[in-house]
Image (cartoon, rainbow, N blue to C red):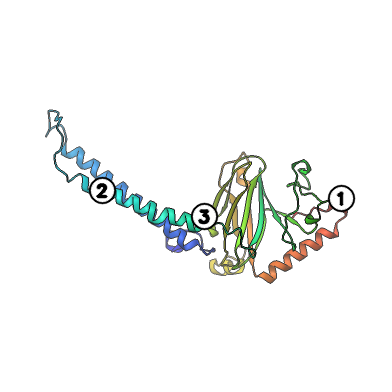
Amino acid sequence: MDRWLGLPVEAAAHAARMDFFMLAVHLVMISAFTFWSTWFLLALFRFRKKKHPQADYTGIKGRWPWIPVSVMVMCDFGLLFGLSLPFWHEEIAAVPLDNADAVQIRVVAQQFQWNIHYPGPDGVFGRTDIALVDGQTNFIGLDATDPASADDIVTLNHMHLPVNEEVIIFLSSKDMVHSFTLPEFRIKQDVIPGMRIPIYFKPIMTTQELRKQTGKPDRNFEMACSQLCGNSHYQMRGFVTVESRDDYDAWLAKKLEEKQAYEDDDWFFQE
């Protein structure tokens, strides 16, 4: 479906359903627009001044105008209760926070970059404090004295994910409203200051498979901001690397070694 609709490749488990949902909404809206536009033109012709030079305050008599109106109401109800609410309940509202096997990542947005925080092998995010934030080495205020922070990894604008595993991303913002967007994974969520918003999905395509399918050897999954957030909004973009679990673990281990190789004053490592 993504090819003939001009959509990005379907790289997440829910992508096909999302595309069907968007297609259904657009078809209903196009049908409604066509119907009401035709109705309007017919009304202009039917009740033109030449045929009705004098106002008729009684109007049309009969029940036939209610038939198309009833059809449109049924379509709207079907769209709301047959598609929208079930989709929201099953795909959006039901975040699997109790899934212990899910890969959990924090993404902290700021003008004009994405700060990506991995909890490390212990699976526990280290403590963060806004008082520790600086614009040079510690963008998220990670507390180096917290034992849970010892194995945490922080990267900039580059996210790594294992394929075919549930991923939960906790979104937050340091300054203003941003919009976290992963087109190939059909993810788009506003990031609002003061809120910690979870999203989840399952990648089903590796970066190597993406490059093979598109025929572009340098192609990456895109990560972008879709909310105008300042004069350098266009620079707020990054990319996602999806790989096997073994490669993902090897990447984490490599980043942890690089972090531990730095002196205490340079413990923070960014990619």
Sequence order check, earlier mark of 3 and 1: 3
Residue in front for this viewpoint, 146 or 233: 146
Q: CA distance from mark 2 to mark 1?
A: 70 Å
As displayed, is residue 95 above or below residue 43?
A: below
Please give the name of the residue rendered at 30% of the width and 51% of the height, measured from the top-left corner. Answer: 74
Q: Label 3 is placed on what type of residue?
A: Ile
Residue 16 visible? The answer is yes
Determine which residue is flagged by label 1: 265
Determine which residue is flagged by label 3: 92
Task: Check whether the beta carbons of the residues at disc 2 and disc 3 lie within 8 A of each other.
Answer: no
As displayed, is residue 115 above or below residue 123?
A: above
Residue at far top of view: 54
Is 2 displayed left or right of 109 in the figure? left
Sequence order check, earlier mark of 2 and 1: 2
Determine which residue is flagged by label 2: 70
- Where disc 3 sits, the SS reads helix
Is 9 displayed left or right of 105 in the figure? left
Residue in front for this viewpoint, 200 or 223: 200
Is 19 displayed left or right of 27 in the figure? right
Q: Nearer the viewer, mark 3 or mark 1?
A: 3
